[in-house]
Image: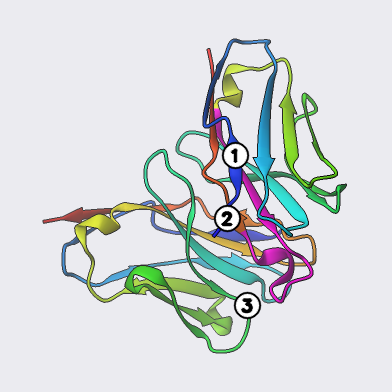
Amino acid sequence: AQSVTQPDIHITVSEGASLELRCNYSYGATPYLFWYVQSPGQGLQLLLKYFSGDTLVQGIKGFEAEFKRSQSSFNLRKPSVHWSDAAEYFCAAGAGSQGNLIFGKGTKLSVKP
Amino acid sequence: AAGVIQSPRHLIKEKRETATLKCYPIPRHDTVYWYQQGPGQDPQFLISFYEKMQSDKGSIPDRFSAQQFSDYHSELNMSSLELGDSALYFCASSARSSGQGAYGYTFGSGTRLTVV
């Protein structure tokens, strides 16, 4: 069955430190891959997406993600975290022509001063 | 730029009542998706429509129905509401004819439904 796994439920980093959020997918073929961020009670904001081509994808707010086919991973990174980055982060994937997405369970990011 | 509009933003209903959520996609987007996000949960795909026809179906309860109208807006109808239906309901739209196809998503801000 198709699935998206985010192994870390909760991560705490210090402001200014680097960040890496993990995402693994299980699909028959390489799916389309997305990272979304959600603040409490708010909507889903797209950070970046991978469709094809360059495996290092740049997104908004200084985030980037690297697609690694051999590891079925699409990890999100940021070199220096800001307090405003504290939120829930969802990795999502989709395949086929229908367009529906499967989301991971999310990783909650806390930022300490 | 125009975004996906959902109404209402908040809705409070009692058990066994009905609710109707509305979604207005971005102009010229032909596909609408509905997702349900329970408290502390990840979004779950419910149903989608392409050119006013049901395209795909996910974990949508039989008590729920949806449709896409001639102007491409969509409505999610929920009957016999249960406490467990309390969630954030997201609509998204895309243009399959565009370069990114069905996955060129834009999400709306969501409707928060509280069933008491």
For the residues labelled 1 and 2, the Cα–Cα distance comes to: 12 Å
Answer yes or no: is residue B60 visible: no
Q: Secondary structure at mark 3?
A: loop
**Residue shown at the point (77%, 24%) measured from the top left:** B63
Image quarter of residue A14: bottom left
* Discs 3 and 2 lie in a common subunit: no
The amino acid type of the residue labelled 1 equals Gln
Q: In the image, residue A3 lies at what x, y percent?
A: 63, 59
Q: Secondary structure at mark 1?
A: strand
In the rendered view of the protein, which quadrant contains the C terminus of chain A? bottom left
Question: Chain under label 1?
Answer: B
Q: In the image, residue B17 lies at what x, y percent?
A: 67, 11
**Residue shown at the point (70%, 16%) measured from the top left:** B18
Residue B93 is one of the magenta-drawn residues: yes
Determine which residue is flagged by label 1.
Answer: B6
**Residue shown at the point (41%, 38%) measured from the top left:** A41
Task: Single out the mark in the foreground, 3 or 2.
Answer: 2
Determine which residue is flagged by label 2.
Answer: B2
**Residue shown at the point (51%, 44%) measured from the top left:** B109
Q: In the image, residue A81 lies at what x, y percent?
A: 23, 66
Residue A77 is one of the magenta-drawn residues: no
Residue A51: mark? 3
Instruction: Give left or right: position of A40 versus A19.
Output: right
Question: Chain under label 2?
Answer: B
Question: Chain under label 3?
Answer: A
Looking at this view, name the residue that lies furthest to the left.
A113
